[in-house]
Every structure is written in C-alpha cells, then in structure tokens.
Image (spheres, helix red, strand yellow):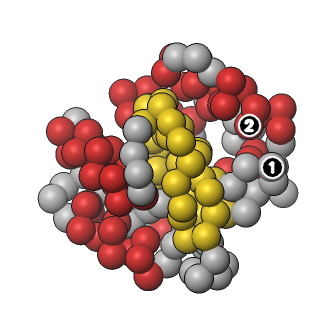
Amino acid sequence: MKSTMLGKEIIMRELTAIDLDVDNYEQVFEIMGARFLEKGYVNEEYLPTIKEREAQYPTALPVEPYPIAIPHTMANAIIKPFIAPVRLKNTVEWGDMSDPDNKFNVKLVCMLGFKDPGEHIELLQILMYNFQKPEWVNPLFEAKTEDEFYDAFVKMEWTHD
C-alpha cells in the first residue's frame, strides 16, 4: 500500500530564503546545502550529489513569465523530506531541463528533498501547474520579508492538470 502523498507541511519555513546574494547556481547549493545539513534535512552526500546531478540534468524550467529552477538529488542524500523556496537577489544562469545547452536567467529556486521518486514526479507536476499562474507567482517576487514570501508560497494549489 502506497503512503499518502506528501503535502504542504514539507514546505519548510526554516529553509525559506529571500534575496540570496549569489553569482551562480553552485553558490545556491553551497549556501542552502549548508543550512539543510545544519538543520538535519540532508547528509554529507547532498552537496556533491546535487552538484553532479545538476551538471548532468539541469533543472530550470521555461515557465512564463519567469523561468524557475527545481533542483533535487538522490534519495540517499535526504534525511527528511522538504521543499525550500528560495528567491535570489539577482538572476543567475541555470541550465534548461529540456536542453542543457540552453540557459535561463533564474531568480526563483524551489529546492526539493525526497525519499520517494513517485512523490518527486507528482510534486513537479504540482509546481508546474502553480508556476503557470501569475496570481500565485507575482506575490513571490513582491514579498518584502521571508515570512511574506513563505506565506505566499504555501498558498499554492496542491493539485495539477
């Protein structure tokens, strides 16, 4: 019997960040990876595996009007499941999921940690559904504080087409 799909409770306030000041996507992994490790969400495997996976299989999606990135890694690096919503101070180049040679300027990163591959597929569909809705996305860019950003993020609809 399959366990129930994870819900919004895995969107973690303590892993939420806005205006992260980085020059490239590797710095996003380093800064956020250190936070995930410190707070017990991931093990030592996380940083090397997410960097390696992103290099092979980029995770930026060409959602209109703003491309997003949804980086994730192998289940064996994850201790407890999470979604960490991150807004960057400035956009960084991020490889296109469907064409690694193509790059998008990403400002919104949704970092995922899962144990069950099935959950990851469903969650990607939920995120894609929400990221196509300006009425949900725009407040993520307008939020002035991490609390506002987090509160806007958890308003996503937990559904997909």
Is residue 139 at all visible to an observer of this figure?
Answer: yes
Callouts 1 and 2 close, C-beta under 8 Å: yes
Badge 2: few (under 14), some or many (20 or more) residues near its Cα, within 10 Å? some
130 displayed left or right of 115: right
Q: Quadrant of residue 35?
A: top left
For the point 73% across and 49% down, which residue is it? 66
Is residue 122 at all visible to an observer of this figure?
Answer: no
Q: Quadrant of the C terminus?
A: bottom right
- Determine the secondary structure under disc 2: helix
Relative to 64, say whether 38 is above or below: above
Q: Position of residue 58 (x, y in %)?
A: 52, 72
- Determine the secondary structure under disc 1: loop
Residue that mark 1 sits on: 65
For the point 22% across and 36% down, which residue is it? 39
Q: Which mark is residue 137?
A: 2
For the point 73% across and 63% down, which residue is it? 62
Mark 1 is on which residue type? Pro
Residue closest to the eye, 25 or 97: 25
147 displayed left or right of 65: left
